[in-house]
Image (cartoon, rainbow, N blue to C red):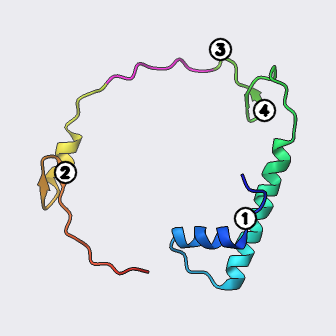
Amino acid sequence: MADTITPELFDYLVELAALELASDEAEYLRHQLNQQLTAIRELERIAVPDDIPAAAHGVPFTAAARPALRADEPVPSDLALALLSGSPDSDDGYFIVPEIQHQDL
């Protein structure tokens, strides 16, 4: 992973997200993201021994404290049919949605 987010990378990410930012907003956000990356790098440098158990909010999360996993079994439901019945148009279990006119940003 890059050590910093360059202006070029940030511009690419802004374009992917279809955001419109003023230059001062873009620079501010890029600076904030770089500060967060720095904080993450600092946390990664903390040595944590493998024998330390995971904890949730400072409470050890032992196997005894964990609830057992339930079986993942499908349960039939008429909910989908009920939802589709309220739709103005559907086909084979899917909503039919009219095409929405849009414009490129």
Report the amino acid beneath label 2.
Tyr
Residue at screen point 86% across, 42% down:
45
Q: Residue at 16%, 46% (x, y): give it.
A: 93
Quadrant of res 3: bottom right
Q: CA gap, disc 4 to disc 2?
A: 46 Å
Question: Dot 1: few (<14), some (14–19), or many (≥20) neighbours within 10 Å?
Answer: some
Reading the image, the residue beneath label 1 is: 5
Residue at disc 4, secondary structure? loop
The residue that label 3 is drawn on is 64
Q: Residues within 10 Å of mark 4 (few under 14, many from 20)?
A: few
Circle 3 sits in a helix, a strand or a loop, which is it?
loop
Using the image, tell me which numbered label, if any, was put on residue 94: 2
Label 1, label 2: how many angstroms apart (C-alpha)? 42 Å
Q: In this orientation, which residue lies closer to the viewer: 95 or 1?
A: 1
Residue 13 picture location, percent across and down: 59, 67
Q: Is residue 14 above or below residue 64?
A: below
**Left or right: residue 50 compared with residue 12:** right
Q: Which mark is residue 58?
A: 4
Nearer-N-terminus badge (4/2): 4
Under circle 1, the secondary element is: loop
**Disc number lying in front (3 or 1):** 1
Q: Read off the magenta span.
A: 66-73
Q: Nearer the viewer, residue 76 or 96?
A: 96
